[in-house]
Image: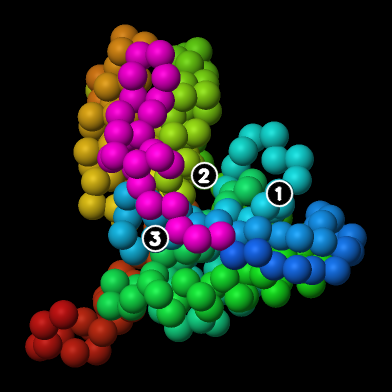
């Protein structure tokens, strides 16, 4: 759970000095120049816990997404969505890996609830070190073209308010969210209700304290600085909406085929 003050965004219970910082894995590697990055002879991979007990944040000692001026992340909710990322696709080959979020200098791996971290963490360590020292890209060249962009919904006359909302998200809120292995996207603003629609991703998307984060942290900060904002709500991202739509279509077909059965 996050605490956002008027002057700075901080974490209350999960800051690096409060939460467990797990051991560092040191990997000896050859020197090489990859297509997206260059690695030194010695690489470190640290892990830290997140507010979500089913998600760990892995921190290689090298930048994963060079020239990432917007500090954006790439999220993969299942193996089918990872076809444009060699690294994410490999991670999904590990039994128990549920979702993957790749940031500028971190990777968040979410596991299935019935899996234990000790063995799974070592498998992720091994795969990350192998891939990051192989020269293979994090994502393929066609990754960005393949992605469904978040459609922002707001009226043109509210553009000034929206820009202020986005600035607060980028400068105050996103750094705190990414610190704990997640990310956040602005989705829309309704001037009539004053509601801001946001999409939480990574470790924050399925975290039990996400509602508290939205209300006590993000909502309080936005309402403090921007009088037009009256509240915030969480909405689904493009991939989640697509998966839900596919599920609903399947459920409809099953009901039509078996009208007397309960689903």
Q: Kindly state the secondary structure of the residue where label 1 is placed.
A: loop
Q: Kindly state the secondary structure of the residue where label 3 is placed.
A: strand
Q: Quadrant of residue 155?
A: top left
- Residue 129 versus residue 68 in the image, above or below: below
Relative placement, left or right, of 82 versus 141 is left
Tell me which residue sits at (59%, 65%) in the image: 25
Q: Is residue 32 visible?
A: yes
Does the magenta segment cover residue 200? no
Count residues near mark 3 (Cα–Cα under 10 Å), then give few for <14, some for 14-19, many for 20+: many
- Residue 30 versus residue 234 in the image, above or below: below
Which one is in front, 191 or 83? 83
Name the residue that disc number 1 marks: 63
Name the residue that disc number 2 marks: 150
- Mark closest to the chain's N terminus, 1 or 2: 1
Count residues near mark 1 (Cα–Cα under 10 Å), then give few for <14, some for 14-19, many for 20+: some
Q: Which mark is residue 55?
A: 3
Quarter placement of the N terminus:
top left
Tell me which residue sits at (23%, 52%) in the image: 208
User: How has the structure been colored for display?
Assistant: rainbow
Q: Quadrant of residue 69?
A: top right
Q: Magenta part of the protein: which range?
A: 1-24
Q: For the residues marked 3 and 1, what is the alpha-carbon distance in whole angstroms?
A: 21 Å
């Amino acid at each position: 759970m996050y605490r956002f003050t008027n002057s700075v965004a901080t974490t209350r219970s999960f800051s690096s000095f409060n939460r467990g910082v797990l051991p560092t894995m040191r990997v000896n590697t050859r020197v090489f120049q990859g297509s997206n990055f260059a690695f030194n002879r010695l690489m470190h991979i640290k892990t830290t816990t997140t507010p979500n007990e089913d998600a760990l944040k892995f921190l290689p000692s090298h930048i994963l997404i060079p020239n990432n001026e917007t500090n954006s992340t790439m999220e993969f909710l299942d193996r089918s969505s990872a076809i444009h990322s060699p690294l994410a696709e490999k991670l999904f080959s590990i039994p128990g890996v549920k979702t993957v979020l790749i940031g500028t200098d971190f990777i968040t791996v979410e596991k299935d609830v019935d899996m234990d971290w000790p063995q799974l963490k070592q498998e992720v360590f091994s795969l990350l070190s192998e891939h990051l020292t192989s020269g293979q890209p994090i994502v393929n060249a066609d990754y960005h073209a393949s992605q469904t962009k978040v459609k922002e919904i707001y009226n043109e006359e509210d553009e000034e308010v929206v820009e202020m909302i986005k600035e607060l998200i980028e400068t105050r809120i996103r750094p705190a969210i990414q610190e704990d292995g997640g990310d956040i996207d602005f989705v829309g603003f309704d001037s009539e209700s004053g509601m801001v629609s946001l999409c939480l991703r990574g470790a924050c998307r399925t975290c039990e304290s996400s509602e508290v984060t939205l209300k006590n942290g993000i909502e309080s900060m936005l309402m403090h600085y921007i009088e037009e904002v009256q509240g915030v709500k969480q909405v689904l991202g493009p991939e989640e909406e697509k998966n839900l739509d596919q599920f609903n279509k399947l459920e409809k077909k099953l009901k039509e085929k078996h009208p007397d059965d309960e689903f």
